[in-house]
Image (spheres, coloured by chain):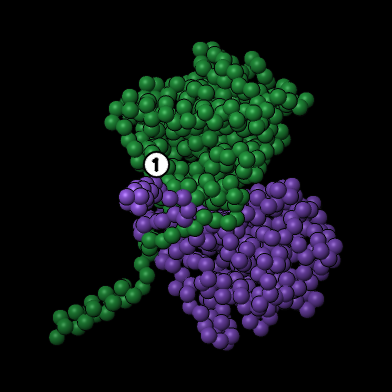
Chain colours: A green, B purple
Amino acid sequence: MRIRIIFGLAVIVVLAIAQTPKPGPREMAARTIPVPTTVSPQIQQLIAAPISPTWNVFPKTNEGWKQLAKEAADATVKTLPALRQELHVKVEPRTIDGVKAYMVTPESIPPENRNRLLVHVHGGCYVNGAGEAATGEAIMLAGFGHFKVISVDYRTPPDFPYPAALDDAITVWKAAQKMANPKNMAIFGSSAGGALTLSMVLRAKQDRLPLPAAIAPGTPMSDLTNAGDSFRTNAMLDNVLVAPDASCDKRAALYAKGHDLKDPMLSPVYGDMHGFPPTILTTGTRDLLLSSTVRVHRKLRQAGVEASLQVFEGMAHGQYGRDVKAPETREAFEEIARFFDKHLGK
Amino acid sequence: MRIRIIFGLAVIVVLAIAQTPKPGPREMAARTIPVPTTVSPQIQQLIAAPISPTWNVFPKTNEGWKQLAKEAADATVKTLPALRQELHVKVEPRTIDGVKAYMVTPESIPPENRNRLLVHVHGGCYVNGAGEAATGEAIMLAGFGHFKVISVDYRTPPDFPYPAALDDAITVWKAAQKMANPKNMAIFGSSAGGALTLSMVLRAKQDRLPLPAAIAPGTPMSDLTNAGDSFRTNAMLDNVLVAPDASCDKRAALYAKGHDLKDPMLSPVYGDMHGFPPTILTTGTRDLLLSSTVRVHRKLRQAGVEASLQVFEGMAHGQYGRDVKAPETREAFEEIARFFDKHLGK
């Protein structure tokens, strides 16, 4: 009798649990997500593009990775003459204290920018984007913002893993101080370049070098451990990076080469951001690195740093720099230029 | 023969189309999204909560809607004594030029805030949150920011549709100018209160009333046409509003009562934001209104307005105001308080 009552209670309890929605992970049904109408036609086209065809292509050899990176760079380089022409910018290769770089110069430089200089670190998940391909984003900020820019063509893995890229960037940062006052200088870059922008400041703090007057890390790869929520929520929605543990992460692993991914020099969201210069961050609502961007923003604010966040409607990873004719592209870069204008000395 | 060749070509074309990923909407497979570890335990608990049990409950009568709203308000009111005690804030009902309101006063007011006054408009998709339930967010900003606040207990639908809420809020705004200098005042509120904050400024511009020195619209219902991308991307992920065309939209429809949803007084993202005061916006990465928030931010920036955006990791709609003990709650309100302190006269 006693046992029967207990069983009866057990059944009631089980029913109650089944009827109450359970706390915990969110179960999402399959669905179709349309292209938003709340962005320009140019950005609609970028959002409508199929997911990157190479997102889950993993070469088995270092040579294979280099070949993929070369193909991507060759394709980018073909687009650069039109970009330079559109924005009236010239690009010249230069070697700075042994590091390859490009001087990126707009045709006209307004008086307030004549003594200012920006340092750019390109993206490409550390492996891609070397050579002249490095210069795309630098051309955009030089053109839209009318600043002189040095774009660092840092050494890349698999041949040159961490800390080669950071070392090269810091070498250029030190050398640049002979060309301009650091108070008149800023550092910027997107994706891996966003992470490098942040780790350059961490490294400059550590080495007691002068800091730039402002920085603009775009959608920074600030957390190589992929801890942020948007690595899950925006997976397969972001058509550029697509998902965690895909091509970009494999390339970042070639850079880290076994080094602790939580080291702030690789994942700057874990760094101490006290004393950072004013920072403007850029991302999009579909960006796989939305969380990696907003977490850096919050961390900077917690450290008392002046930090500004711009989040573009509908955009996946780095799409604010993909189409020079999109009004949002001009908007994103002009915002960064205004932020630099506010914070840089003359 | 000719026909056979054409058919052969057709087959090849069809195969090619099938093999190339098509541009257009994104097809998302079913998936499980875990609770992020990158937020405090308190916010993890909010994110882990099942989707709102009333998200798709639609009463068939006005009385049914009123009953639901009353139940929700009663539940909220029970939590307020502890909130007031925690934050050392007192709340007194007051009628201001015929409009019901609450004076929300912190125990200690620092000298710089003695001549400052904030006006609060509560959320609840226009139907919910009336009466004392209106005061929760006002208590938080009074407590964390040490400001005096008037919380407007505006009339609600179904009995009082648009523009009753806006009329009441503007009546209080006008009356408040006899209590403080508008240069020392700000307006804030979340969700419907975020939209009302924005439409109050549009209305004040239109009626040539003094504008506040700053505003803080939190996750504003700025687009009742649901045009933004996050209405789709965050549907069923946001456990508060859950999805478009759910309870919140039905309540907003009771407010609009057939009025054009694209009227800027109902959907302020379509309004002219030139001349707006400095604005701080707050949202979360899982917010169904993430797009409605970032679109307002961009619109303000395009109009040359000083506008600051804070996006909290992992949070769904309005979760920055749900748990007074969460460190993110303090952070969100202290950011707003700092922004007001920067922009308000003394």
Residue drawn at 74 percent across, 50 percent down = B303
Q: Which picture quadrant has residue B268?
A: bottom right
Residue drawn at 75 percent across, 57 percent down = B272
Looking at the rendered structure, the number of numbered marks drawn on it comes to 1
Q: Which residue is at the front of the view, A67 or A235?
A: A67
Looking at the picture, how far across and down is residue A232, in whole percent?
40, 51
The residue beneath circle 1 is A53
User: What kind of residue is marked 1?
Assistant: Pro
Judged left or right of residue B179, residue B61 is left
Q: Quadrant of the C terminus of chain A?
A: top right
Chain name for mark 1: A
Residue drawn at 65 percent across, 26 percent down = A89
- Relative to B57, is B83 above or below? above
Judged left or right of residue B183, residue A78 is left
Residue drawn at 81 percent across, 69 percent down = B175
Callout 1: SS: loop
Q: Quadrant of the N terminus of chain A?
A: bottom left
Looking at the picture, how far across and down is residue B157, in whole percent?
64, 79
Looking at the picture, how far across and down is residue B210, in whole percent?
83, 60
